[in-house]
Image: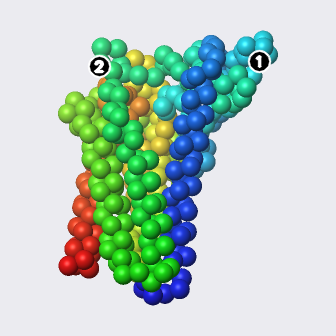
């Protein structure tokens, strides 16, 4: 495998993809700094609200109209920003933007999102949780780059580096799955309950498995619209998908949601779909990590 002339190219392509993702993250960080340092704030009004049109739009797109420091008005389209809450024209939020680039904008204060009255505010992610995804991309990209360089020169460290890539991917996959479980802890312990409506069901193809077992699988995700206890309407994609389709458009289903974050929901059972997926992620991450460590130990001993 490592003696193949195409393997260095494959490693280089993977490293390039990961570095590109890292570049996008760094670019967004720089854009955010320009909004925060030297940026301007203004009150924005919801100008219009578009329909949910899966698979392209699984939440309601909308446009905000706000005034620039020059006095001119600017209208900016957003694909998301209300966390699944259905906005209405005339709603007012606060935005922060770069005066030199009014399209570089974020919603800084949104009174229509957040917990139900009397429920605690959701915990902000810690520094480790914020840095971990980018650190994971960086580590895997560096390992792939090193693997490309070593394999291109016919070095003996190709196999140990391949094991290191496996272990790193497994560790970060398991860490992400643990984060999902922690986020759904309140939903599992004390869920709120209501009835929702399935609004759209569509076909989606995903890739499953790895190596020779890699295959395309057809799934049927769906969107759900429901109303929470304080009257807000939520309309967004369900966290689960299945084949055959579990529901049909227009069907009424039970919905469990978190009072702290009422836009996070689970159909049929509190946290069921997300929890199963997280446990699978932890299992696969553990397998990848153990296989990677085994490859490194075996080849270096």
As helix, strand or loop, the secondary structure at mark 2 comes to: loop
Where does the C terminus fall, quadrant-wise?
bottom left
As helix, strand or loop, the secondary structure at mark 1 comes to: strand
Position of residue 178 in the picture relative to residue 231 (left or right): left
Q: Which residue is more in the foreground, 281 or 270?
A: 281
Query: Residue at 37% across / 66% down in the picture?
Result: 165
Residue 112, percent from left and from top: 49, 19
Where does the N terminus fall, quadrant-wise?
bottom left
Q: Which residue is more in the foreground, 254 or 294?
A: 294
Disc number for residue 73: 1
Query: Residue at 59% across / 42% down in the picture?
Result: 27
Query: Residue at 30% across / 37% down in the picture?
Result: 183
Residue 254 seen anywhere in this rendered image of the structure: no
Residue 53, percent from left and from top: 61, 44
Vertical comparison of 111 with 222: above or below:
above
**Quadrant location of residue 187?**
top left
């Amino acid at each position: 495998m490592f003696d193949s002339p195409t393997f260095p190219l494959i490693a280089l392509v993977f490293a390039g993809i990961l570095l590109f993702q890292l570049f996008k993250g760094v670019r967004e960080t720089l854009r955010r700094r320009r909004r925060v340092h030297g940026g301007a704030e203004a009150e924005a009004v919801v100008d219009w609200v578009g329909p949910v049109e899966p698979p392209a739009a699984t939440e309601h797109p909308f446009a905000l109209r706000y005034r620039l420091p020059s006095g001119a008005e600017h209208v900016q389209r957003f694909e998301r920003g209300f966390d699944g809450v259905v906005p209405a024209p005339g709603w007012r939020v606060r935005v922060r933007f770069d005066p030199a680039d009014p399209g570089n904008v974020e919603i800084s204060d949104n009174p229509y999102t957040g917990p139900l009255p009397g429920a605690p505010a959701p915990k902000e992610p810690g520094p480790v949780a914020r840095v971990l995804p980018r650190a994971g991309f960086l580590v895997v990209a560096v390992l792939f780059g090193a693997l490309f360089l070593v394999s291109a020169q016919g070095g003996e460290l190709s196999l140990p580096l391949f094991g290191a890539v496996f272990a790193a991917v497994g560790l970060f996959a398991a860490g992400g799955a643990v984060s999902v479980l922690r986020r759904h802890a309140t939903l599992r312990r004390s869920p709120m309950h209501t009835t929702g409506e399935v609004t759209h069901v569509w076909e989606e193809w995903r890739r499953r498995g790895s190596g020779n077992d890699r295959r395309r699988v057809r799934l049927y995700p769906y969107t759900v619209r429901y109303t929470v206890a304080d009257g807000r309407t939520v309309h967004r994609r369900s966290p689960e998908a299945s084949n055959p389709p579990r529901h049909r458009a227009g069907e009424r289903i039970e919905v469990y949601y978190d009072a702290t974050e009422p836009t996070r929901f689970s159909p049929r059972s509190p946290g069921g779909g997300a929890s199963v997926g997280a446990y699978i992620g932890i299992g696969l991450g553990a397998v990848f990590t153990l296989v990677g460590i085994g490859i490194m130990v075996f080849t270096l001993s």
